[in-house]
Image (cartoon, helix red, strand yellow):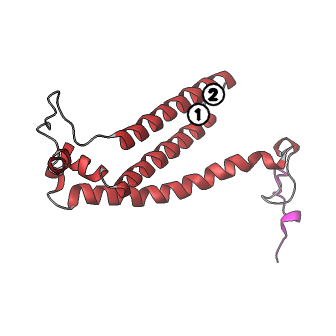
Amino acid sequence: MTTTNSDAVLPAQGIEAPRSGRIDPKYLRSNPSAGSFEMVAWVFMRVSGAALVVLIFVHLWVNLMVGDGIHQIDFAFVAGKWSNPVWQFWDLTMLWLAMLHGTNGMRTIINDYAEKDSTRLWLKSILYLAATVIIILGTMVIFTFEACLVNEAGELLEYAPAFCENVTQ
């Protein structure tokens, strides 16, 4: 004996079964396209999360496991890495995805827990401002990083990478 969703009613309370086709009018959307941003944000979280797992594990492997491990990380190591456009793009992608992923997650938390509209507005404004500043500053650091630093006399600083000796001569 089977019942369909349309005739399945809990006897004591008179509550209809889930997915019975009857929706309380307060839950109906007036504009069906209004949820498209949330859908895109939901998909972005899944895609960016998967991409970040790959980006971060490769980043950690190259920095901590290859070569001398943690002992190799210094100014010269970063300068050597960022002299290669592939690593600049890698780190830039990691920065942008991590900041946008985290900002989207915080936006969702603010929407869930901030009860007043004014509180929600202020919290999200601060969040977006902070994310924008960090993305801009991080991008500037990656693209304007100068590996071959010199002092006032034009001599290389002591912690300049070895490849800078060939560049300045």
Tell me the SS state at disc 1. Answer: helix
Which quadrant of the structure image shows residue 47?
A: bottom right
Q: Is residue 92 above or below residue 156?
A: below
Q: Position of residue 73 (x, y in %)?
A: 19, 48
Q: Which residue is mark 1?
A: 110
Which quadrant of the structure image shows residue 69?
A: bottom left
Considering only order in the chain, which callout, 2 or 1, is on the residue closer to the N terminus?
Answer: 1
Q: Amino acid at mark 1?
A: Ile
Residue closest to the eye, 153 or 45: 153
Q: Is residue 86 above or below residue 160?
A: below
- Determine the residue located farthest toward the front in the rendered image: 169
Q: Is residue 8 magenta?
A: yes
Query: Would residue 57 be found to the left or right of residue 97 on screen?
Result: left
Quarter of the image for the N terminus: give it: bottom right
Query: What mark, if any, has residue 120 been given in the picture?
Result: 2
Segment colored magenta: 1-15
Residue 107 visible somewhere in the drawing: yes
- Callout 1 touching callout 2 (CB < 8 Å): yes
Residue closest to the eye, 109 or 93: 93
Main secondary structure of the magenta stretch: loop
Q: Is residue 49 above or below residue 74?
A: below
Q: Position of residue 113 (x, y in %)?
A: 60, 33
Which residue is located at x 14 percent, y 36 percent?
157
Tell me the SS state at disc 2. Answer: helix
Which residue is located at x 47 percent, y 46 percent?
96
Which residue is located at x 25 percent, y 43 percent?
147
Which residue is located at x 13 percent, y 35 percent?
155
